[in-house]
Structures are given as structure tokens and as C-alpha cells.
Image: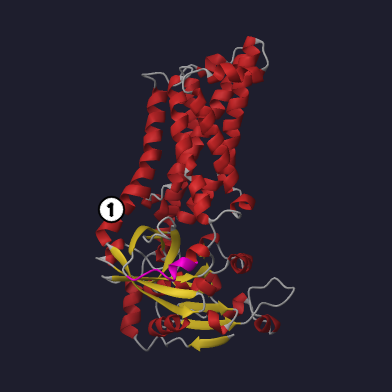
Amino acid sequence: MSTQVRPRAATARPRTALAAVATAPDYRRNFARRARLSDLLVVALWASGAAAAALFLASGGVDQFTSVAETVTSIGIVSGLVGTDFILVMLVLAARIPLIDRTIGHDRAIAVHRSLGKPALYLLLAHGALLLTGYGLSSGINPIAEIGPMLSLPDMPLAFIALGLMIAVVVSSLIAVRRRFSYEGWHLVHLLSYVSVAFALPHQLSVGGVLADGTLQRVYWIALYVVALGSIVTFRFAEPLVSSLRHRMRVAAVTEIAPGVSTIQLAGNDLRGLGASGGQFFIWRFWTPRTWWHSHPISLSAMPTASSARITVRNLGTGSAQLTTIPVGTRVSIEGPYGLFSDAARTSPKLAIIAAGIGVTPVRALLEQASFAPGEATILLRASTAEETYHWDEIRAIAAAKGATCYSMIGHRPRGIDSWMTAADYERGVTLQSAFPELADSDVFLCGPTTWLDLIEADVHASGIRPQQIHAERFDW
């Protein structure tokens, strides 16, 4: 491991250093505010499920537990209500609502979204099975035989289709299954969840009188559907369309900077008005006949100016490979910015930044915008070969200008050992603590390939620092 940039002495620019300290954000207070909002969101999530069950019980449902058949049927109704509630909460979490993104971050919102998928599906499957069983017990016939009469009820065929679509969505989201899809193919299947929700609504309002006209339950569910579907329409479609039309972005240049790695320079109107922070990403769509149907989540590799922005793309498959041949002048539409891999997530003035491979792209923009005094930031850049040192010269220049320390590690990992370091650095006893002696008092930003990132993240957690100090940006989906 070699030092590439030496930290400037604190006395070199005393007025600048004092000014930085005087104007530095109150990171702990900002974190405490986000933590409170995050707790409120979690409470609201679980409270919505409890409200769905409580409203049913308060609207006469509690009186329907008088026999075995009615008890089974009522439990089935509650399962369906809570399961549907979870589905709508999942839509809200996936809607990329700015308040949620600023509070818990896009990655955590999607993680919670995914964690609700299986419980929601199990509850909906239980809903169907318990209703069939309850109706069968009431009529004295085989529950399977109840499927025919149930399908004859108004809107019930749509409900069965909705359940089938939801099964397809959840199964396609399982990691083992998801890896068999391209991102675009998986995303197309995932859009079926919107169709599923739309198909499920009619039977809720028309079958069985559970959500009868004039009841508080009906008001609650219509409001929840309006919030969920309204959020999707507003923040996944309307806002990105308005932003794209406002900023009128086009490809200005495509430049190969290493084998399989290219920068895409973008031109547009008032690009500072995008409100992006260093480290955040956008969903990009390039309007050519071959790429218009691909959406690409890519981080900024430089902070936007008034008229230009830049991303850096590595050839990791057919979709990303096509971006390197996009003609100059191609129109670009955007969604974003997203993510908390930025100054907004910090809890302390000191920074420890570790990036590998193409993971340097958000780090480069993060470092450009980050606020810190000379000597308060340390960067470690990691690559397997010298050809993978994308944007390293730019990062070193920014580090030198801002008084940060910059290290590098180039080489392959040791064979047979799970280590994020090079074999040479591992053998000579380099540790996380030796590279970052002030790690316990720093926010740690990590970005790189998934396997490498898992190793470095485990090492950082093992150091004993608080979880809120660790910020990892992953490139998987």
C-alpha cells in the first residue's frame, strides 16, 4: 500500500480550515432527525397492517367468531386485508418518494420492500385457502369444490388473476430466480404488481360487504390505494417526465477511458437544478432504437455544472455495452436523484472512503462535494490491475486540493483467503485500522463489486464502529 497524496498541514490554510469548521453541518443532529423520521416510518408501516385488522374487527368482524366455520372465514378475511395492506406499503416504498429516500435511503427502502414480499404473498395465499375452507365448512362440501361458486361471484375472477400475478412477481424476485433474468426482463415482470393491485381492488369493494358503502373501512382502503397508486404515478412517471422535459439532456460525448469503460458526457439546461448530491445515482434512459427500453441505474461520476453532467459506464452485459456506442445528440430521460450515499448520511466530520473497480465513480463525485477540513478524510482506492484505475488521477487531484490522504492498493487478492486486500498487503500485515487509524470516529463509505464489498463491509463491522457510520453502495439489483 502506498501513499499517493500527503495531507496538507492544518496550518497551511488556517482561515479556510476555521471557516470549514465554523460552517460544518451538525452531522449528529442531522442523523438524529433522520433516525426519528425512520422510526416514524417503521411505526406507520406496522400500524397500517394493525389498522386494517382493527377496522375489520371494529366494524362487526369481532361478532363473526361464533362458529368454527365463521372463525376460519374471518381469519381468512383478516389475512387478506393485512396482506393487501403490505402490498400497498410495498408500492409506497418502491415509489421513490423523496421524503422516504432522504430519510432511509433508496437501498433500505427497497430492502424493506423485498422483505415484505413473502409475508404478503403468504397472507394472500392463506386468505384464499382459509376462505375456501370456511365456506366449505359452512356448506358441508369439499373446499376445492367451492372454487367454482366463488368464481361466479362478481369481480372474483379478477381477484384470482391478481393472486396469480402476485405469485409470479414474488417468485421472480427470489435471488436464485432473479439472477436468471436481465434487469429489463425482471423489471417488466415486476410491473405486473401494479396490474395485480388494480385487479384486486374491485373484489374488495364489492364482495361480502366487508368494505360496504359509508364505512370507515372503505374510506381507509380507498385512501390507502390513492396514496400507493398516486405515489407511483407521481414519482415514477409524472415527476421524471417533467424533470426530463425541463432539463432536456442529450449525449454530448462518449469517451473510452479504459478497455470496457467509457464516460458519457451529458449536456442540458440548469443541471444544478437537478438537486443531486455527490454519490447519488439516477435512472437513465437513452432514446435510441436499441436502448430506449433499457433503464440504467448509474451514479454520477462528477458533480453537475449548470450545463453538463457525467456518468461512467463499465461493460457488464449487453445493456451497458450498448451505451458505449450511443450517438452524440441522443436524448436522455432521467429519474432521480436517489440514494443516501452522500454527505446527507454522515454522522461525523471525519471520512474514511474505500472504493474498488467501477465503485470509484460515486466516490469521485462524493469526494468532490463532501465537506471536511484538511486532514479529516482518508481515501483508499483498490484495483486488481493498473488498467482498472478509472478516475484515480481525478480523485487524487481532489484529495490534494482538499487536504485528504489518498492510498492505493493494486493487485489480486491472496489465493484461498477471504480478504479484500492485495496479496502483498495482506502478507505484510496491513489492516483496516493501520490504514485508517481514526476509523472509530469516521463515517465509512464503501463502494465496489459485490463480492469484494461483502468482505470489506464485514471487516468494517468487525471493527466495532456503529452501524450508522457505515454506508455501502451496491451495484446489484
Q: Give the residue type at disc 1.
A: Val
Q: Nearer the viewer, residue 360 or 429?
A: 360
Give how far across and how far down residue 119 sits, in percent.
Answer: 59, 38
Which residue is painted at 65% across and 14% down in the image? 137
Give how far across and how far down residue 173 sits, in percent.
Answer: 57, 48
Q: Does the magenta segment cover residue 324? A: yes
- Vertically, is 49 above or below 358? above
Which residue is painted at 62% across and 66% down in the image? 451
Give how far across and how far down residue 251 sits, in percent.
Answer: 34, 69
Prevalent SS, magenta region: loop
Residue pushed farthest right? 416
- Vertically, is 202 above or below 135? below
Q: Residues within 10 Å of mark 1 (few under 14, many from 20)?
A: some
Q: Is residue 126 visible?
A: yes
Q: Nearer the viewer, residue 456 or 12?
A: 456
Which residue is painted at 51% across and 37% down in the image? 86
Span of residues in magenta: 321-328
Task: Determine which residue is flagged by label 1.
Answer: 242
- Vertically, is 264 above or below 216? below
Label 1 residue SS:
helix
Give how far across and how far down residue 424 sits, in percent.
Answer: 67, 84
